[in-house]
Amino acid sequence: MIILKIGGSILTEKDSAKPEVNFDNLNRVAKEIKDALYSDNFSHDLSDGLVFVHGAGSFGHPPAKKHKIGQPFKDEEYLDKRIGFAEIQNEVKKLNSIICDVFIQHGIPCVAIPPSAFVTTHNKRVYDFNLNLIKEYIKEGFVPVIYGDVVLDKDIKMAVISGDQVIQYIAKFLKSDRIVLGTDVDGVYTKNPKTHDDAVHIDKVSSIEDIESLESTTNVDVTGGMVGKVKELLELADLGIESEIIDANEVGAISKALQGMEVRGTKISKN
Ligand code: ADP
């Protein structure tokens, strides 16, 4: 089973104050997935499982920040928090629906799986996440589409679950073979490459020590930014599940990576 995650930085205009889809990228991503699935090089068929995960981008991050979901709050703020939660849940669902529309137009048999409908967390980490339905959809050749969402939390009442945390959980318990994570940079650097000309590309991350110095350079969004991604993926590397972070803006990179071809990026692996 392969998990492909494409970040909100690709599928949305991430810096936009209002929710906005990047349709050029979305259409290209759909085409690249379709091309890979039906390519002769793809030693994989849909019943082996492809799970697609997407981030929330400008649909989720601005309202999550505004409503401070995931932070402690007073009892008298509870109504406002619930409205905020509802707003975010509704926005990310809209993004998901647009993504699924485009995937279906491209002939990808996708099915939306919203975490807010069945996942709970305990202090922001997954507590309850029933994978049975996802397994059934995979078995029947569907492509489950799961995404960053808001969820009920046993400890702090409401939390944001990132697409990156979703990947980690699914990969671990459905025993994914590998993970391809597409974002708007070609992997992990010693510093944020968007703001530092002297950032050096890291080809491979094998342990937490490799990224310790990165923490201060990362512009962290509510879900943890680049360091957050690598931390989630390192937990999988410990279980022998390899990931690669690639530049999903590079035309053809997603398709090649799905087919197991070499693409410039950062590998997260113990070996
Ligand atoms: P996505 O929305 O695709 O999940 P994010 O915006 O959360 O992606 O993370 C990708 C961003 O992380 C890049 O645009 C880059 O500016 C930033 N970034 C910060 N620090 C680093 C780093 N050390 N290496 C690579 N990218 C980094």
Image (tube, rainbow, N blue to C red):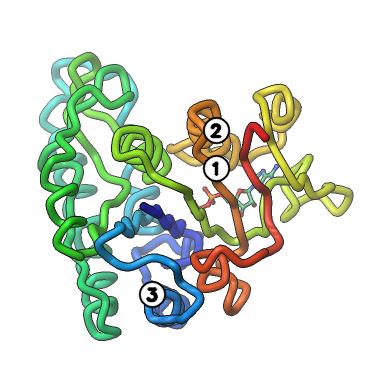
Q: Residue at x 30, y 51 (%)?
A: 147
Q: Residue at x 67, y 52 (%)?
A: 187
* Residue type at the position of mark 1: Glu
In the picture, the quarter occupied by the C terminus is top right
From the top left corner, tell me how far across and down residue 47 is, in percent. 25, 62
- Tell whether circle 3 marks a residue whose Cβ is less than 8 angstroms from ligand 1: no
**To which residue does mark 2 refer?**
237
From the top left corner, tell me how far across and down residue 133 is, in percent. 11, 46
Q: Of label 3 and label 1, which has the lower sequence position?
A: 3
Contact flag, marks 2 and 1 (Cβ < 8 Å): yes
Residue 113 visible, this angle: yes
- Within-10-Å neighbours for mark 3: few <14, some 14–19, many 20+: many
Instruction: Give residue 161's quadrant in the image.
Output: top left
Residue 65 visible, this angle: no
Q: Which mark is residue 37?
A: 3
Query: Label 3 to label 1, Cα distance in Å?
Result: 20 Å
Q: Residue at x 12, y 51 (%)?
A: 136
* Residue type at the position of mark 2: Ala
For the residue pair 18 and 233, the one nearer the viewer reads as: 233
